[in-house]
C-alpha cells in the first residue's frame, strides 16, 4: 500500500535514530595528537580518565577500547570464572551477557518491568543460587535502574553489582551520578552513544583494587605501561595475569576529552527532545512511551515507545518499515538476549523464560533522538509517526 506519506518523503534523507556530533574543536584535538610522539597510550589517556572521573564523580576511571571491553574488564576485576553465574536483564545488547561468557561464566537471564523495561528487582532473589557472583544492571534507554533495591539484594547475598551504563552517561539516581551507583560502572563511546571516541569505553569505580585490575587487564595483564618503562630505569616488565590488548589510543582520548566538554549541553537537548515527544504522544492511544521514575535524571540515549494495539502479529515490523519509508530511521532495541541462537544452543535458553521482555519485543520501536536533531526534525518524526500509526496500527 503506497500512502501519501510514501510519496511525500521518498526522496528526502532519513533522520537516523542516533548520530554522533563532531565539531572543529574535536578535529583539532585529534590532529594535535596525530602530530605528537604518542599515538597510543600516552598523556591524553590519563587526562581523559581524570576528566571522566571528575565528571561522573568516581574515584577511579580506566579508559578501554570499547564498552564491551569495559564489561569484560569488570568481570575480570571481580574474578568471575568458570561456572560462576551472573544475573543479567533479558532486555539489553548482547555484550551485557557475553562478558560473563568470555570469563567462562553463565549469564542468568532475568525479566524486566513492563513499564520501564528495566531489570525487575522483585525477581532477582528467585534467580540467586550458591554459584551467583554478580548482577549486571542495564540503564536501558538512559534511565538508571533502581540501584537502592538492587544493591540491597546484592549485599544481602554477598554479590557484586556492575552497572552497564552504556546508555546513561550524564544521568542521575536519587541525586547521585551515574558512574557511582554500582561497584563497577561501565560506559561505551560508540558513535551512537552520548559521547564518542570512534570505539571506546570506560570503567568507573570507587575501589582502587578493581581499578588496578581493570588497568592491567587492558594491557595483557602486564603491570606497567610502555611509556612508564621508557621513562624509568629498567625495560623489564612482568605479566601477572592473562589480559588483552584493550587499550584506547591517545588520539581517541583527545576526542573523548573534547566530547566530554559538550556532554551536559547535549543531555539538556536530549531532554528537550524527549519532552516534545512525550507531549505529542501523551494523548495517542496507539502508543505508550516508557515510564520514567521520579527518582531519576534520565540521560535519554534512546526514545522507545511501545505499540499499545491489542492485536500485534507483525504490526510492529509493518510500522517500522513504514517509518523507514517515511524517512525515519527507527530501530528496535533489543531482541531479548536469551532468544539468540547462540544462547539457545549453548545455554539452553528458550522463549517463555522472560515473558515480559518477550512481549515487549513485539511492541517496541526506538525513535530518533540525538543532540543535533533540529526542531523541524522533531516535528517530522512526530507527524510521520502519527500518520503511520493511523495507517498500520489503528
Ligand atoms: C553499546 C552497548 C554496549 C557495548 O558497547 P561497545 O562500545 O559497542 O562495545 C554494551 N551494553 C549496552 C547496553 C550497549 O548499548
Image (tube, helix red, strand yellow):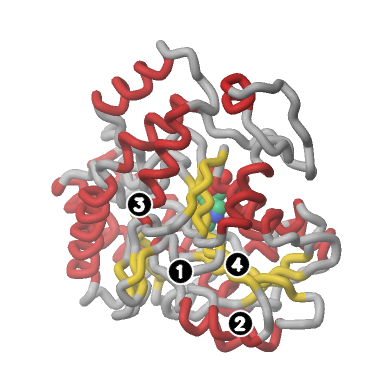
Q: Where is residue 312 in the image (x, y as percent from the top left)?
A: 50, 72
Q: Which residue is denoted by mark 4 in the rendering?
A: 136
Q: Where is residue 275 in the image (x, y as percent from the top left)?
A: 20, 65
Q: Which residue is denoted by mark 2 in the rendering?
A: 155
**Disc 4, ligand 1: is the CB inside 8 Å?**
no
Q: Quadrant of residue 256?
A: top left
In three-dimensional space, the C-alpha distance between marks 1 and 3, rounded to whole angstroms, equals 15 Å
Q: Which residue is denoted by mark 1 in the rendering?
A: 181
Question: Can the viewer see residue 120 in this picture?
Answer: no
Q: Position of residue 220 (x, y in %)?
A: 73, 36
Earlier sequence position, callout 1 versus callout 3: 3
Check if mark 4's residue and mark 3's residue have beta carbons within 8 Å: no
Q: Is residue 116 above or below residue 31?
A: below
Earlier sequence position, callout 4 versus callout 3: 3
Residue at position x 30%, y 31% in the image: 22
Check if mark 2's residue and mark 1's residue have beta carbons within 8 Å: no
Of the two numbered discs 1 and 4 in the rendering, the one whose residue sits closer to the viewer: 1
- Determine crowd level at label 2: few under 14, some 14-19, many 20+ residues with C-alpha closer than 10 A: few
Of residue 225 and residue 75, the one placed in the foreground of this image is 225
Question: Can the viewer see residue 386 in this picture?
Answer: yes
Amino acid at each position: 500500500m503506497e500512502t501519501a506519506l510514501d510519496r511525500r518523503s521518498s526522496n528526502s534523507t532519513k533522520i537516523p535514530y542516533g548520530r554522533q556530533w563532531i565539531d572543529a574543536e574535536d578535529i583539532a584535538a585529534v590532529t594535535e595528537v596525530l602530530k605528537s610522539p604518542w599515538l597510543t597510550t600516552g598523556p591524553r589517556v590519563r587526562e581523559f580518565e581524570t576528566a571522566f572521573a571528575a565528571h561522573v564523580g568516581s574515584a577511579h576511571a580506566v579508559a578501554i577500547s570499547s564498552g564491551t571491553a569495559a564489561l569484560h574488564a569488570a568481570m575480570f576485576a571481580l574474578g568471575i570464572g568458570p561456572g560462576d553465574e551472573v544475573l543479567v536483564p533479558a532486555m539489553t545488547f548482547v555484550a551485557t551477557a557475553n562478558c560473563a561468557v568470555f570469563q567462562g561464566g553463565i549469564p542468568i537471564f532475568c525479566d524486566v518491568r513492563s513499564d520501564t523495561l528495566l531489570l525487575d528487582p522483585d525477581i532477582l532473589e528467585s534467580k540467586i543460587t550458591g554459584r551467583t557472583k554478580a548482577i549486571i544492571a542495564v540503564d536501558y534507554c538512559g534511565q538508571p535502574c533502581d540501584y537502592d533495591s538492587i544493591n540491597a539484594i546484592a549485599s544481602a547475598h554477598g554479590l557484586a553489582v556492575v552497572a552497564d551504563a552504556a546508555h546513561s552517561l550524564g544521568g542521575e539516581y536519587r541525586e547521585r551520578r551515574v558512574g557511582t551507583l554500582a561497584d563497577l560502572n561501565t560506559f561505551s563511546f560508540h558513535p551512537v552513544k552520548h559521547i564518542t571516541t570512534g570505539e571506546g569505553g570506560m570503567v568507573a569505580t570507587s575501589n582502587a583494587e578493581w581499578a588496578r585490575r581493570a588497568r592491567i587487564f587492558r594491557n595483557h595483564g602486564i603491570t606497567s605501561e610502555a611509556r612508564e618503562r621508557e621513562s624509568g630505569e629498567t625495560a623489564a616488565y612482568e605479566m601477572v595475569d592473562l589480559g588483552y590488548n584493550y587499550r584506547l589510543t591517545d588520539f581517541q582520548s583527545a576526542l573523548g576529552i573534547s566530547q566530554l566538554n559538550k556532554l551536559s549541553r547535549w543531555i539538556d537537548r536530549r531532554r528537550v527532545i524527549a519532552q516534545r515527544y512525550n507531549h505529542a504522544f501523551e494523548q495517542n492511544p496507539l502508543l505508550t512511551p516508557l515510564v520514567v521514575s521520579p527518582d531519576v535524571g534520565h540521560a535519554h540515549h534512546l526514545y522507545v515507545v511501545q505499540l499499545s494495539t491489542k492485536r500485534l502479529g507483525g504490526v510492529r515490523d509493518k510500522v517500522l518499515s513504514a517509518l523507514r519509508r517515511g524517512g525515519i530511521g527507527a530501530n528496535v532495541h533489543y531482541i531479548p538476549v536469551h532468544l539468540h541462537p547462540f544462547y539457545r544452543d549453548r545455554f539452553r535458553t528458550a522463549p517463555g523464560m522472560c515473558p515480559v521482555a518477550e512481549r515487549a519485543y513485539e511492541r517496541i520501536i526506538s525513535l530518533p533522538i540525538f543532540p543535533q536533531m533540529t526542531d523541524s526534525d522533531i516535528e517530522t518524526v512526530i507527524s510521520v509517526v502519527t500518520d503511520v500509526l493511523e495507517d498500520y496500527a489503528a
